[in-house]
Image: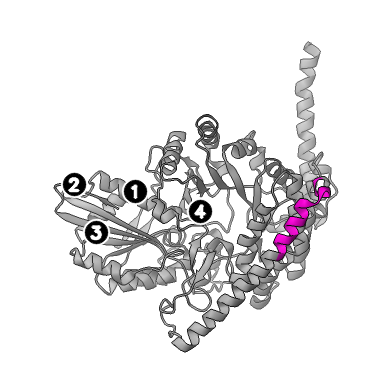
Amino acid sequence: MAVAAESVTRRFRVVLIKPSHYDDDGYVIQWWKAWIPSNSLASLYALARDLGEKRALGDDVEIVIEAYDEMNTVLPIRKIADRLLAEGNRGLVCLTGVQSNQFPRAMDIARQFRDRGIQVAVGGFHVSGCLSMLPELPDDLKEAQALGISLFAGEAEHRLGEVFADALEGRLQPIYNYLSDLPALQQAVTPFLPHELVQKYDGVISSFDAGRGCPFQCSFCTIINVQGRKSRWRDADDIERLVRQNREQGIFRFFITDDNFARNRNWEAIFDRLIELKEREGLGVRFLIQVDTLCHKSLGFVEKAARAGCTHVFIGLESINPDNLLAMKKSQNRITEYRRMFQMWKERGVITYAGYILGLPGDTPETIKRDIEIVQRELPVDLLEFTILTPLPGSEDHQRLYRAGTWMDPDMNGYDLEHVTTGHPRMSKEVWQQTYRDAWRWYYTDAHVARMMRRNVRYGIKPVRIWHGVLQIYCAMRYEGVHPQQCGYFRYKVRGQRRSGLTPEPVLAFYPKRAWQILTTYGGMGLYLWRIHSVRKRIQKDPATRQYSDLAITPVADAEGEALEMFELNDSSRAAVEKARRQAAGRRDKSERVEAPVEAAE
């Protein structure tokens, strides 16, 4: 993308790269089509385009933008470097949205550019989290600085022009730190990716953030320490403009990346505007949002979300054990609200995902398996995504372990929420890792997949949506061996893109092994999906399915008065339920006192 003018005499090339990360064999994880679009990439692309349109670097400077998401693209690093050097090396490679597990890959990319004298900057949650929560730079950031890589911490709105201007003059600063100055988002440039990039994601889906910041204090979370705990939001006009812009290029599906959309203080105005666009102009959108377990307590939230186009919701469930919730400072999760909350989403036709964290202090393989079975029986959640409790740099958990001198794996590549990176009081590393693998199998049994399909038919939802969800969530781990958040369709594995320090495999060893991997992976996945497809067809044709019922979908009449296994897990569970009952009784008493004078006056 270029912004040209007749007076242009110089060209400044901006190369935006969202790195992937390495698998256990040291190969870059990338796909024919990735599943989750990068909002960081979309944000930086839009900001760079805006600077070009405004000729922020001068009337004589043309800004040219290249953008790559390595999750769905094999990076042409040599060609990119050749273009930059052919233009006088006026440009900047920006490694965007780099998470901790992606930092080793980002460094390997950066080295190749720095070896040819090309300017590189890196930003994202790893850099921002480390600068936010640690007293000094960790070794990997020091290494980056030693290579002449510029570090960017914070958010780029209103700041990117300064970085580009410095790069144009060849005087990048070692660190740009804007963590203490978080920008307002009203009337700010909204995220955007052109269609040629969006079509590389499953279903042609783009992303945007409608707000940033979360008021809660979850100890595992990095977002609250980087984006803050105060809600900052975009205006409904901003969202409408974004929707119209994307509809013009045929894009109407979005991942709204707010860490907790339910705490976006402008949620209702945004939903109302999306509803208006859909119902009055036919400009409907479909989207996934992330919320907390109390979202349904905000009057009208679930109903308006569905009307606005929410088809999938990701919910921070994390655990059904109050001891675990307390350990991760997730006091906002109330086990007595879980069933009604999930039921409200299902009644609106929404597919529910929930995060579930494994490895809290009291966890053992036995307690984890027990709790998963209770979830299967008592909660109408559709899809669970399991993660290993990971001390991500930028989180309170990481800061606490760092200060205590507790061992943490120094290899950031493993901080992908699916590898054990520190110790556990009741499980060895091997047992913890195996339990994580087993958890997927324990939850996604054939019997439970069929049960999920029957529940959805009862709610008027086509069971093929569960089939598709199982394909993306369970098959990612079972067949591809990666978490669904970093998965996609058809894995690329490039022999020449192996982690630095690892020896390239011989041609005669690599390609036969890769062929066998493709055959066994996709052959096994195809047979499994066909079997589940056959189950789906039988369930959909069976008239009895429409009268199906079980405990999970039985309407909640008295949330605090139910007799559930979840309420009897331990003393903390019983105490949480008793507290909820006292609070409910207090609300009833207060309501009766308010109503009594009214009745007397009548």
Mark 1 residue type = Leu
Is residue 252 toward the left or the right of residue 58 in the image? right
Along the viewing direction, whichever of 83 and 579 lies nearer the viewer: 83
In the rendered image, the residue lying farthest to the top is 602
Q: Residue at x 79, y 31 (%)?
A: 588
Q: CA distance from mark 3 to mark 4?
A: 28 Å
What residue did someone put label 1 on? 47
Between discs 1 and 2, the one toward the N terminus: 2
The residue carrying mark 3 is: 167
Residue 107 locus on image (x, y percent): 38, 71
Please state which of residues 233 and 401 is positioned toward the viewer in this rendering. Answer: 233
Q: How is the image coloured?
A: one colour
Which disc number belongs to residue 5?
Answer: 2
SS type, badge 4: helix
The residue singled out by tag 4 in the image is: 223
Disc 2 on helix, strand or loop?
loop
Q: Which amino acid is tagged 2?
A: Ala
Q: Position of residue 16 (x, y in %)?
A: 35, 59
- Span shown in magenta: 531-546
Name above or below for residue 417 compared with residue 557: below
On screen, residue 199 versus residue 565, left or right, reads left
- Which mark's residue is nearer the viewer, 1 or 2? 2
Foreground label between 4 and 2:
2
